[in-house]
Image: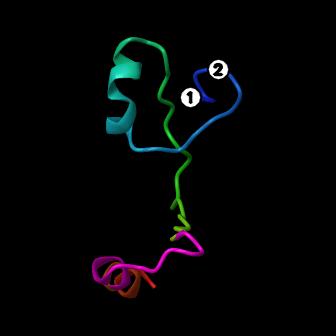
């Protein structure tokens, strides 16, 4: 949304904005050569205990 408003740029998979590109609301530009590094963050509510599934997922990603 911020990109649509002209307030920035974003690096994202083209399929996530396919409709906007088709409607010419956004323009896709190629990245420079090289690798794009990503940093993922897992957030959880401080006072809510995790379910078994949430604990298992946290164990897989950390």
Image marks 1 and 2: residues in contact by CB distance under 8 Å: yes
Residue under the image location 58 percent in, 40 percent down: 10
Who is closer to the viewer here, 47 or 54?
47
Residue at 38% from the left image edge and 11% from the top image edge: 23
* 60 vs 43: above or below: below
The x, y position of residue 55, in whole percent, is 37, 84
Local crowd size for mark 2, using a 10 Å CA cut-off: few (<14), some (14–19), many (≥20): few
Describe the element under mark 1 as helix, strand or loop: loop
Label 1 to label 2: alpha-carbon separation: 6 Å
Image coordinates of residue 44 in percent, x first then y, are 52, 70
Q: Quadrant of residue 21?
A: top left
Instruction: Provide the residue designation for mark 1.
Output: 1
Q: How many marks?
A: 2
Using the image, determine if residue 7 lies above or below residue 35.
above
The secondary structure that dominates the magenta segment is loop
Image-based side of 7 in relation to 1, left or right: right
Magenta segment: 43-55
Percent position (x, y) of residue 17? 39, 30
Residue 45 lies in magenta, yes or no?
yes
For disc 2, the marked residue is 5
Residue found 32% across the figure and 37% down from its top: 15
């Amino acid at each position: 949304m911020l990109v649509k408003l002209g307030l920035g740029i974003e690096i994202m998979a083209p399929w996530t904005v396919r409709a906007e590109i088709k409607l010419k609301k956004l323009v896709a530009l190629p990245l420079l050569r090289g690798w794009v590094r990503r940093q993922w963050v897992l957030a959880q509510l401080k006072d809510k205990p995790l379910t078994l599934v949430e604990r298992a997922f946290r164990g897989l990603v950390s």
